[in-house]
Image (cartoon, rainbow, N blue to C red):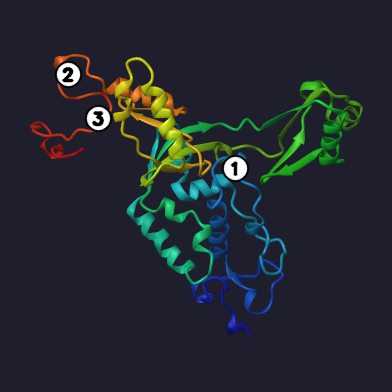
């Protein structure tokens, strides 16, 4: 009946917004609010890492998990998702050394959505919302996606596999992206209408290039960040940390490196069992240094904390201090 239409996600009716039928489901599963469907699609995207190399095409936000038909409402792109989470202005300005913090209102809204999701088993676990709630993210690396995939092909077997994957359309889809064969490298100078024949005549070893079939935006950039509000109780690999400290301490002049304080945080994208980025406090510029290697980070932290002379007193680079005795700006006294 018309008056029995309810959203299968929130179980509310048309009073909470117009209902649509985005797939081939019928009965009680037929109708949804567009905003509820968008929330589901965003949840699927948020649950994926931020680096293209770490996420796969997730069919849940393209296909209905009941009737398996493709949704008539395409999901938001990763760029649109980023803009929805941070605002379009911030999304466009994300760069290394930026800090992004979740506002109180934004955190309360995510908590409200998590409460709603609690009614659906498994929803909450599959979202990344909890990482965003009152989160403070330090952007450590932003790598622009140039839209190209260069493929060195060492054997005719590999070349034939690529031909089969590209097919007559000379396009290949993977990880939510569609690539097409480019007139570059071994196919440089070949007109578009001649690419299929030129690829068929190509012999290994050779190098070909695939480019994105669609225009790129900053949403395609790979972003690595550390959530400074989510410390870990232990290192992902304690043995790796102990070995790194021991190697540094064995070097001349670095015996005190064992006193360097190490704190571990959740970050991404990363392997749960690996250390990916190291941040050393102190130094000029922004006040910290990002390094990819743990040993180098321990050495730098030790060097910055080493006293250079009596005039330095008890302070060293990278140490945490509390402001006291300020007269020009007394409101800052007590701040760390």
Q: Is 140 or 74 nearer to us in this picture?
A: 140
Whole-angstrom CA distance, mark 2 to mark 3, is 13 Å
Q: Is 303 or 115 nearer to us in this picture?
A: 303
Whole-angstrom CA distance, mark 1 to mark 2, is 46 Å
**Mark identifier at residue 54:** 1
Q: Position of residue 127 (x, y in %)?
A: 51, 57
Q: Position of residue 177 (x, y in %)?
A: 68, 43
**Dot 1 surroundings within 10 Å: few (below 14), some, or many (20 or more)?**
some
Quadrant of residue 26 in the image?
A: bottom right
**Mark identifier at residue 124:** none
Quadrant of residue 66 in the image?
A: bottom right
Residue 34 drawn above or below residue 232: below
Residue 75 drawn above or below residue 223: below
Residue at the location (35% across, 29% down)?
A: 280
Per the image, the residue denoted by label 3 is 319
Provide the secondary structure element on which disc 2 rests. helix
**Dot 3 surroundings within 10 Å: few (below 14), some, or many (20 or more)?**
few
Per the image, the residue denoted by label 2 is 312
């Amino acid at each position: 009946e018309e008056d029995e239409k309810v959203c299968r996600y929130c179980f509310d009716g048309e009073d909470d917004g117009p209902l649509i039928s985005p797939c081939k489901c019928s009965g009680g599963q037929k109708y949804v609010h567009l905003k509820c469907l968008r929330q589901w699609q965003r949840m699927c995207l948020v649950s994926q890492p931020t680096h293209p190399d770490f996420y796969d095409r997730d069919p849940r936000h393209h296909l209905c998990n009941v009737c398996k038909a493709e949704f008539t409402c395409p999901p938001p792109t990763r760029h649109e998702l980023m803009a929805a989470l941070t605002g379009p202005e911030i999304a466009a300005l994300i760069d290394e050394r930026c800090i992004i913090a979740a506002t109180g209102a934004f955190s309360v809204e995510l908590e409200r959505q998590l409460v709603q999701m609690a009614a659906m088993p498994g929803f909450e676990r599959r979202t990344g919302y909890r990482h965003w709630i009152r989160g403070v993210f330090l952007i450590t690396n932003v790598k622009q996606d140039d839209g190209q995939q260069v493929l060195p092909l060492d054997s005719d077997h590999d070349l034939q596999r690529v031909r089969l994957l590209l097919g007559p359309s000379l396009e290949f889809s993977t990880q939510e992206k569609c690539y097409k064969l480019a007139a570059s490298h071994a196919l440089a100078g070949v007109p578009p209408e001649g690419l299929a024949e030129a690829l068929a005549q190509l012999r290994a070893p050779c190098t070909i290039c695939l480019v994105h079939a669609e225009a790129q935006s900053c949403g395609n950039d790979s972003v690595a960040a550390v959530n400074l509000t989510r410390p870990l109780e232990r290192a992902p690999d304690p043995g790796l940390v102990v070995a790194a400290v021991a190697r540094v301490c064995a070097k001349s002049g670095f015996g005190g490196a064992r006193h360097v304080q190490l704190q571990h945080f959740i970050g991404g994208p990363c392997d749960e069992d690996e250390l990916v980025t190291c941040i050393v406090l102190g130094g000029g510029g922004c006040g910290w240094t990002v390094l990819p290697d743990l040993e180098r980070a321990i050495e730098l932290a030790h060097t910055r904390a080493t006293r250079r002379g009596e005039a330095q007193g008890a302070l060293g680079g990278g140490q945490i201090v509390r402001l006291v005795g300020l007269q020009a700006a007394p409101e800052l006294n007590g701040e760390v």
